[in-house]
Amino acid sequence: MTDTSGWVAIAREDRETVGYLEPVTDDYDLVQPRSLLGHAVGAPVDYDSGERLVERFSLAELAEQWVLDAGTADEIAGLTVIELSPHGVLLADYYATKGLMPTDTTRVVWPDLQERLSRA
């Protein structure tokens, strides 16, 4: 399990959390910007630059279609995020959830540091 206790949640003016800054140095002088899923956003940068970079994101990113383990034999395409919490990322069939139809779900560990999820 990844220790995210040092990660700083970045929120917009409306208090919507849009991503995180993971410290690379103990003094937070250098941070790794991360999306809501925990994916690295670019290379490590100074704190202010990281904050500006992450502020461009929003929850809308999660509404997109995702592919689990893209390029592998076990690839599952056409997924949407239906829940995101420290307990994991819960995914379901994109179209079935839009039609409010029951569907099987898949859970991925959060943060997704292995980047098992990629945009479709």
Image (tube, grey):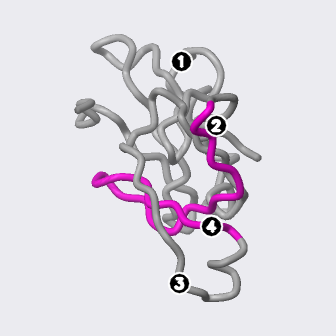
In whole angstroms, how far apart are the C-alphas of marks 3 and 2?
A: 39 Å
What is the C-alpha distance between the residues marked 1 and 3?
45 Å
Report the quarter where the N terminus lies: top left
Query: Which residue occupies 67% across, 64% down?
Result: 63
What SS does tag 3 mark? loop
Q: Distance between the Cα atoms at labels 4 and 2?
A: 33 Å
> Which region is colored magenta?
73-94
The crowd level at tag 3 (other Cα within 10 Å; few <14, some 14-19, many 20+) is few
Residue 39 x, y percent position in the rendering: 54, 33
Q: Residue at x 66, y 39 (%)?
A: 118
Residue sticking out furthest to the front: 73
Q: Amino acid at mark 3?
A: Pro
54 is higher (above) or lower (below) than 42:
below
Verify CB contact (< 8 Å) between mark 4 and mark 2: no
The residue tagged 4 is: 93
Indicate left or right for 47 with 6 as reference. Answer: right
Kindly identify which residue carries mark 1: 46
Compute the Cα span from label 1 to label 4: 38 Å
- Residue closer to the observer: 45 or 116: 116
